[in-house]
Image: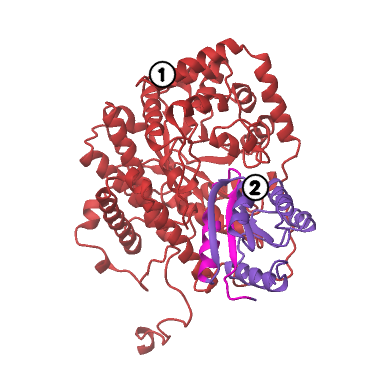
Amino acid sequence: MSGSPIKVVVGKPGLDGHDRGAKVVARTLVEAGMEVVYLGLRQTPESIVAAALEEDADVIGLSVLSGAHMTHFKRVRALMEEKGLGDRLLTGGGIIPTKDQETLAALGVGRLFGPGDDPDAIVDYIRDWVREHPREDAV
Amino acid sequence: MAQGTTPIESPETEPGRDFTTVSGREVKPVYSESDVAPGDLEANLPLPGEYPFTRGIHPSMYRGKLWTMRQFAGMGTAEQTNERFRFLLSRGQTGLSTAFDNPTLYGWDSDHPLSEGEVGKTGVAMDSLQDMERLFDSIPLDQVSTSMTINAPAAWIFTMFLANAERRGIPFEKLRGTLQNDILKEYIAQKEWIFPPAPHMRIITDLFSFCAEHVPQWNTISISGYHIREAGATAAQELTFTLQDGFTYVEHALAAGMSIDDFAPRLSFFFNSHLDFFEEIAKLRAARRIWARHMKERYGAKNPRSWLCRFHVQTAGCSLTAQQPEVNIVRTALEALAGVLGGCQSLHTNSMDEALALPSDKAVEIALRTQQVIAFESGAANVADPLGGSYFIERLTRDLEDEAEAYFAQIEAMGGMIKAIEKGFPQQELTRAAYEYQRALSDKRKIIVGVNEFVNEDEELLIPILEIDESVEPDQIAAVKKLRESRDNIAVSRGLDALERAARTKDNLIPHLLDCSRAYATEGEITQTLIKVFGEFREQSFF
C-alpha cells in the first residue's frame, strides 16, 4: 500500500435530513487518518458518483435513514460500474433491514452499518477492505 | 450502638464508573440545603399554576386533566394512515398526530423525480386536498385534536386541512390541534427547508395572524427542541436553542405589527425526553420558568396565558437500540415518566422497534399502554410536581436556567438566532456534542445495555417488523396524475397566479393558499409557485 491516505466520499442521497450519523462517521474517519469529502444533504446518485470520480475516491459511503436505501444504493452501485469505479468500495449505514442488506450485498454493495455500531468498526472495515482489494490502477 | 452511627466503610467511588449525565454534566454524590441558593426556593417555587410556573401550568395538574396521549403516526397512503389513526383511537389514544413522508415535508409531489423511493416510507404521502379528505375520513375533527408535524410547507398543508374541514361543514373555530410550523429548528437540525429564512418567517407570522382571527383554538406553532436533541444536542443546548427560536418568532410577529397577547397564547413547544431522568425533569421545569419570565418581563405580555410554556414531549428516538429491541420498552417508560414528572401537556412514547423500522401495530400498542400504566397505575399523575423542593432537582433546574441565559447572551451578541444559524453556530455546537457522545460510547465511558456492554452475541430478532408495500409509490403517483386531469384546472391556475402576485406584496398569504387548496392545487404546484418569488435555501456542509 502506498503512503497516501484512503479517500472517502460521504454523502446523503435523497431527501433524508438525518445527518448526525454521517457527520460523526466522517469525523471518525478523519481522526483515523483518512481523507473525507463530505458532500452533505440532498445528493443524487449521479452527484455522488461524479464527486467520487473527480476525487478519485477509494470508498463511497452513503447514509440513508429514510427507507429509500434500496433505490439509492442500487443506483449508485450501477453508476459506479458504468463510470469505471467498479473496483471501489460502496458502504454506508442507516436503518437498513438485514434482508435488504443481503439483497444489496449480492449486487456488490459492501457491509452496511446501523444504530449501535461503533464508528471505529467502520474504520477497521474500510482499512481491511482497501488492503484486501488493491485498485486495478494501483501499479 | 456505635455501629449504628458510624457509616459502613465503602470506597468513595467504584473504579471505572461514570457519574456524569447523558449531557456530560458532573453530578455530586449527594445534594443538600447548601446546594440551593438562599431565597431561590421562595422566589421560584410558588405553587403549580402560579408564575413563573416552575412547578407546572395548572394548580391541580393531571388531576384536572391527564396529558393527551398522542402517538405520532403515518405511513404509506392516506387510507393506511387513517386505519392506524382509528386503531389508536380504538385503543384509548386521546389525540392524533400525523407523520408525513419526506417528499411532503419538502413540499414536493409524489411524482417529483427526487421523490423516487421515498413516497410513503417514513410517513403518509400528501399531495392535495384529496389525500387530506382520505386521511381524516370518519374522524370527528371537531372532537379530536390533531397535530401535524410539518414545517417548511406547513401553511399549505394546513390550508388543505382547513379546506377539508370546510367541505365537511366543521367551523374553523371548532378545530383544535397543533401545526409544528417551526422552520428555525429545520435549519439547525432536521434540515427540511424550502426558502431562505426571511420568506419562511413571513409565512409563519401570516399564519399567526390568520389563526388569531379565524382558527382561535389552533396552536399555530410547536417550537421544537426534539429534533435539535436528536441531532446531538445536550439538554442545555436543546433548552437554549428552542427557547431562543421562540424569542425569534415573538420578535418577528411583533415587528409585523401584532401585539403580544394576540398570538403568544397559541405558541406551544415540543421537547425531547432522554434517558437522564432527573436532568430531563429539570430541563422541562426550567423551560417553563425561563419562558414565563421572558414573556412577562422582556416582552411585556399581560395575559397570563401568554406566559405559559405549554409543551408536548416525545421520548428520545436516539436512545433506542436496534439490539435487543424489547429493552426499548423499559427505556421509553423511564423517559415517559420523566416527561410526566416534568409536567408535559401531551406525550408520545416511541415504540420498541423504531431503530429498525416504522412501528408495527403491536409495538405501538405497547407504547401507548406504557402511558396508560403511568397515568392509571403508577400514581405519578395524582400529585402536581411531586419532585418540587428536592435539592437535586431544584439545583439542576437552576443550573440549566443559568446555562441557557449565558447561551442566550452569546447568541444575542452574534446578532440573534437567524444570524447565528447563518454562521452555523448551533449546528456546529450540536455536531460537536454528537461526536463527543459517540466517543464516550466507543471508549465505554458511557454504557448502553446490549450495545457496548451486556451484548447478546447470538441474538435473534423476535419481533414483527413493518414493511411498506412497494405498490404505495406507483399508486400515489397515478392518483396525483389523475387528479391533475380531472380537477378544474382553470381554477387552479387562477389560484396559483393570485398566490404568486400576493407573494410579491406584503399581503397575508394564507387566504390565497386556502383558495389554492380548495381548488385541489397540489402541494408541489404551490411550492414551485412560491419558489419563483422566494428562491431556495442552500446549506453549507461541514462536519
Q: Residues within 10 Å of mark 2 (few under 14, many from 20)?
A: many
Q: Nearer the viewer, residue A19 or B292?
A: A19
State the image coordinates of residue B5 (x, y, percent, origin top left): 34, 84
Quadrant of res B201: top left
Q: Residue at x 36, y 53 (%)?
A: B425
Instruction: Tell me the tag on residue B388.
Output: none
* Label 2: element kind: helix
Quadrant of res A60: bottom right
Q: B326 left or right of B422?
A: right
Q: Which callout, 1 or 2, points to the residue nearer the camera?
A: 2
Q: Nearer the viewer, residue B425 or B184?
A: B425
Magenta residues (range): A2-31
Q: Residue at x 50, y 41 (%)?
A: B192
- Looking at numbered disc 1 in the image, what kind of residue is underneath it? Ala
Chain of the residue under the numbered disc 2 shown in the image: A
State the image coordinates of residue B406 (x, y, percent, origin top left): 27, 56
Q: A105 left or right of B71?
A: right
In the rendered image of this protein, does residue B305 appear above or below residue A128? above
Examine the structure image and report whether residue B16 is included in the region drawn in magenta.
Answer: no
State the image coordinates of residue A66 (x, y, percent, origin top left): 62, 46
Residue under pointer 2: A45
Between the residue at mark 1 and the residue at mark 2, the CA separation in whole angstroms equals 37 Å
Please report contact status of discs 1 and 2: CB closer than 8 Å, yes or no.
Answer: no
In the rendered image of this protein, does residue B427 appear above or below residue B216? below
Q: B519 left or right of B287?
A: right
Residue under pointer 1: B502
In this orientation, does residue B90 appear? no
- Looking at numbered disc 2 in the image, what kind of residue is underneath it? Pro
Q: Colour of chain A?
A: purple
In the rendered image of this protein, does residue B480 appear above or below residue B358? above
Q: Colour of chain B?
A: red
